Image (cartoon, helix red, strand yellow):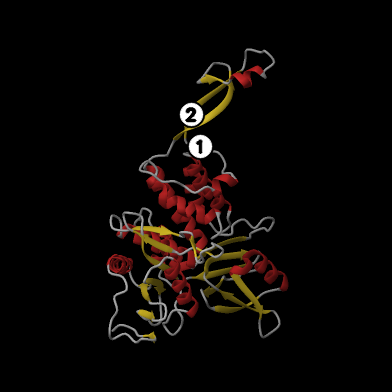
Amino acid sequence: MTERAPFVVREYEEVTVELSFAEQRALRALAGNRLVVLPGDSPGSWRVRAGSYVGTVAVAGVRILIKPKVTTANLFHLLEAGGEALDTGPEIFDYDVTGDLLPAFATFYARHLEATLGHGIVRAYCPVDERLVAIRGRIDVRAQLSNLGLPLPVACRFDDYSADITLNRVVKAAALRLIRLPGVTTATRRALLQLLGRLEEVGPASDVDLRAPTSFNRLNAHYRGVERLARLVLQGSSLIDATGAAGAAVFLLDMNKLFEEFVEARLGHYLDGRLRVVAQRPTMLDAAGHVRMLPDLVFEDRAGRVVYVADSKYKVTAGGYGRDSDYYQLLAYTTALQQPEGVLIYCRHDGTAPARWVDVPTAGKRLRTRAVRLDKTIACTEHELRALADEIAGWAETPGVRDDRLAIVGVRPER
């Protein structure tokens, strides 16, 4: 029996596939709300509709490949975000050929992990309580008294300079997860196993490790990129480990989240020394504090004062305009933060560019829009982000400047 070819669907599109009832049920169970599976027009046919998640969903006999609309190079550039950029590797070529994100991402992660560990394994002093045959550090008197008067072993407390820290446990756990997934190439598994040998003294990651945010400094800054990739594997953006299902795996990345984090990292880089970029800053809409909001990006000056606000949106409507709800959301942010204007930052990979601004005369607010192209080269994307950072810095200095040519009500694109 020949193996079935993978079914390919692009994000925000759908494809009709032939599935048994058991296969579609397993597909629904694994993908959850990340993938919509609906009955087709004929018996045995099903419509598989993708949203903002891209990647691979595999059950026994069925493999669904969800491809993004952005270019492959830009997809991996989004994954790198603020981390160390690597030269184009075989994973990008493989993904262009196969369309299967899972093995390509595993290779991508292995290259980043190798480059990170090549800069040195991060260590830190960790408190240790242990019973030893010789005194090390200081004696834990209370624990020693509970030893029924026996002189040995000695209860000791000391600080150990160890690699068994949260950061290393997270990147190791991600490598172990990827090794177990079907579809990862033999060469990548071998590379990951060799890298795990360098992390031999690092223990397993706990739930506390996965929940705890990482604090970066000059000693561990080279881990920033690989740590972000590891958390994509271990946390909400990816659903890994189909327990009890042979040959089943799910690896899905939320393009909305990837785009938001990418914009945050790149604007933070280009605005360094001018403005501080704060993501998901808690803000209250009402005076009593009942309505809590989390703007995607808040910009602060050197004194810590809020001087601008932005919201990132991955997808523009078909007509090239922002969604009504997006404008309402940004209007609420500008009102709560007492800013005369803000900007919606969209990803543009096809269609018409969004309008440049909307004036709200009754509220005295200007809601700007800017699009970042992800259908061209990485250099083009970086050029647009650098220009956007310069614009935001200028808007923050002279907010609310009005143009007499602007329509009082509605949207008017700049030409």
If the image is split into quadrants, where does the C terminus sit?
A: bottom left
User: In the rendered structure, are the residues bearing label 2 and label 1 in contact, judged by CB atoms less than 8 Å apart?
Assistant: no
Q: Is residue 250 above or below residue 115?
A: below
The residue closer to the viewer here, 323 or 258, is: 323
At 52% across and 60% down in the image, what residue appears?
Answer: 102
Q: Quadrant of residue 344?
A: bottom left
The 10 Å Cα crowd at callout 1, few under 14, some 14 to 19, many 20 or more, is many
Task: Count every numbered label the image shows and give the total.
Answer: 2
Residue 183 at x, y = what percent?
55, 59
At 57% across and 45% down in the image, what residue appears?
Answer: 208
Q: Secondary structure at mark 2?
A: strand
Kind of residue sitting beneath label 2: Asp
- Judged left or right of residue 18, residue 390 is left
Q: Is residue 193 above or below residue 353?
A: above
Alpha-carbon distance for marks 2 and 1?
Answer: 10 Å
Q: Quadrant of residue 267?
A: bottom left
Residue extending furthest toward the front: 287
Q: Secondary structure at mark 1?
A: loop
Residue 94 at x, y = what percent?
44, 63
Residue 73 at x, y = what percent?
38, 65
The residue closer to the viewer here, 184 or 170, is: 170
Q: Is residue 373 above or below residue 170?
A: below
Q: Which residue is mark 2?
A: 160
Kind of residue sitting beneath label 1: Asp
Q: Which residue is mark 1?
A: 164
Looking at the image, can residue 123 be seen?
yes
At 67% across and 58% down in the image, what residue appears?
Answer: 246
Residue 302 at x, y = what percent?
31, 54
The residue closer to the viewer here, 117 or 192, is: 117
